[in-house]
Image (cartoon, rainbow, N blue to C red):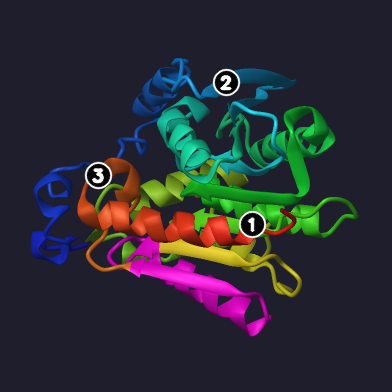
Amino acid sequence: MTTVRLRPSALHSQLRSFFRFVPNPPITRPWLLRLMQAGSTRVSRPKLPASMTHRFVPLGDGAGAHVFAPRGRQRRAAVLWIHGGGFVVGSASQDHARCVRLARDLDVVVVSAEYRTAPGNPFPAALDDVHAAWTWLVEYADELGVDPGRLAVGGQSAGGGLAAALVQRVHDVPGAQPVAQWLFCPMLDDRTAADRSLDPVRHYLWNNRSNRVGWRSYLGVEPGAPDVPRYAAPARRENLAGLPPTWIGCGDIELFHGEDRRNAEALAAAGVPIVLDVVQGAPHACESIRGGAAVSTAYLRRAEGWLRGHLAGGL
């Protein structure tokens, strides 16, 4: 099979010098995946401004919640944030700086979920863990100084997929509901991994071979089967009516661009207010890898502006 190289010229000029040399994570080799997972377990303490507090709340079975809260007694909105890692690597600590910035910029409480990863903990372990974080946030909203009517769920990559799955699961049961879902380059559809025509394309940072390892590890079976468990792959859901307003952001040269666009179109067809922000020449997770680039900061500014507007109700 001939490898199709995405030319560096396809990259945005502000991202080109860095991303052209970024490899895919070596998760296709089991021993390297285990090594990466071991590295992911290292816990780092967040760097906090004097105006913010942090604490970690264990929720059992590998689940937990890092709580970032601006000081002060006013009642705030809150965001449940879910980190990425292809379902197989990563930890909440990788996004500590992001959560601090979000809590500061929007003056909100941010709860960053810790969850178990596959293949050692396949579906529904990760979803159960982030659901535990959501349930805890709702239950302790008063103690946290949080308005339960102004909660959002967000995430990046696999964390974006888990965020979308969580929103669907929460939607289907009575109780507090998020007012928005906020999804950065979300990993939504196992059928992308099953499309072998995508394998030769050398997508920057995350290619379809890595994608297949991630989905296979999470599902416990090869991706693309006729049926998968409910909530395992959010793009498989047929009835999207009634889901909260949604923001989806992605790059136009990343692997998930197609599935993210299709999901946005399906949400719009179901009457869900949707914004799809596609960044030209941006590869996967550009706002994390090159957050200082002007194109990335503008992208984050638009995303935060959208979220701010949807959390502003009830003041």
Residue 16 percent location from the top left of the image: 12, 53
Q: Quadrant of residue 251?
A: bottom left
Label 2 amino acid?
Answer: His
Q: Nearer the viewer, mark 2 or mark 3?
A: 2
Q: Which residue is mark 3?
A: 290
Q: In which quadrant of the rendered image does the N terminus lie?
A: bottom left
Q: SS class of the residue under badge 1?
A: loop
Q: SS class of the residue under badge 2?
A: strand
Q: Which residue is mark 1?
A: 312
Region in magenta: 250-278
Residue 248 percent location from the top left of the image: 49, 63
Is residue 285 within the magenta segment?
Answer: no
Q: Which residue is mark 2?
A: 54
Q: Earlier in the sequence, mark 1 or mark 2?
A: 2
Q: Earlier in the sequence, mark 3 or mark 1?
A: 3
Q: Image height check: is 209 above or below 200?
A: above
Q: Determine contact: label 1, label 2, CB under 8 Å.
A: no
Tell me the crowding category of disc 3: few under 14, some 14 to 19, or many 20 or more residues within 10 angstroms, Cα based.
some
Q: SS class of the residue under badge 3?
A: loop
Q: Nearer the viewer, mark 3 or mark 1?
A: 1
Q: Nearer the viewer, residue 44 or 86?
A: 44
> Is any atom of residue 187 visible in this view?
no
Q: Please give the name of the residue rendered at 57% of the width and 21% of the height, measured from the top-left corner.
A: 53
Label 1 amino acid?
Answer: Ala
Tell me the crowding category of disc 2: few under 14, some 14 to 19, or many 20 or more residues within 10 angstroms, Cα based.
some
Label 3 amino acid?
Answer: Arg
Q: Please give the name of the residue rendered at 27% of the width and 65% of the height, measured from the top-left corner.
A: 253
